Amino acid sequence: MLALSRKKDEAIVINNDIEITIIEIKGEQVKIGITAPKSVPVYRKEVYMQIKQSNEEAADIADIAKINNLL
């Protein structure tokens, strides 16, 4: 993991087309802005993990259905 220090209104650039800017700092909370191409999905980690789990569950159900069709 790369750890960087940034101040308000400072940014980092990832892969020439994603920019993360520090918008606001209040106590222990940091508000960031992300500029990325529409083709790049951006999720909060907890939402990403829910999506991933749902996809895995759907894949498991699909696999069971395929097995049942073979029998």
Image (cartoon, helix red, strand yellow):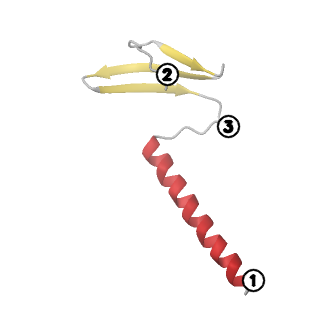
Residue 28, picture quadrant: top left
Q: Residue at x 38, y 26 (%)?
A: 31
Looking at marks 2 and 3 on the same chain, the residue that comes earlier in the sequence is marked by 2
Q: Secondary structure at mark 3?
A: loop
**Mark 2 or 3, closer to the camera:** 2
Q: Position of residue 29 (x, y in %)?
A: 30, 28
Residue assigned mark 1? 70
Give the distance between the C-alpha atoms of the residues marked 2 and 3, in whole angstroms: 24 Å
Looking at marks 1 and 2 on the same chain, the residue that comes earlier in the sequence is marked by 2
Name the side, left or right, on which 32 lies relative to 66.
left
Q: Amino acid at mark 2?
A: Leu
Q: Is residue 52 above or below residue 20?
A: below
- Nearest the eye: 56 or 33: 56
Q: Secondary structure at mark 1?
A: helix
Residue assigned mark 3? 39
Name the side, left or right, on which 29 lies relative to 52.
left
Q: Amino acid at mark 3?
A: Ser
Q: Position of residue 12 (x, y in %)?
A: 52, 17
Q: Amino acid at mark 1?
A: Leu
Residue assigned mark 2? 2
Looking at marks 1 and 3 on the same chain, the residue that comes earlier in the sequence is marked by 3
Q: Secondary structure at mark 2?
A: loop
Give the distance between the C-alpha atoms of the residues marked 1 and 3, in whole angstroms: 38 Å
Q: Position of residue 66 (x, y in %)?
A: 70, 76
Location of the C terminus (image quadrant): bottom right
Residue 41, picture quadrant: top right
Crowd around label 1: few <14 · some 14–19 · many ≥20 (10 Å): few
Q: Is residue 9 above or below residue 15?
A: above
Q: Is residue 15 above or below residue 68?
A: above
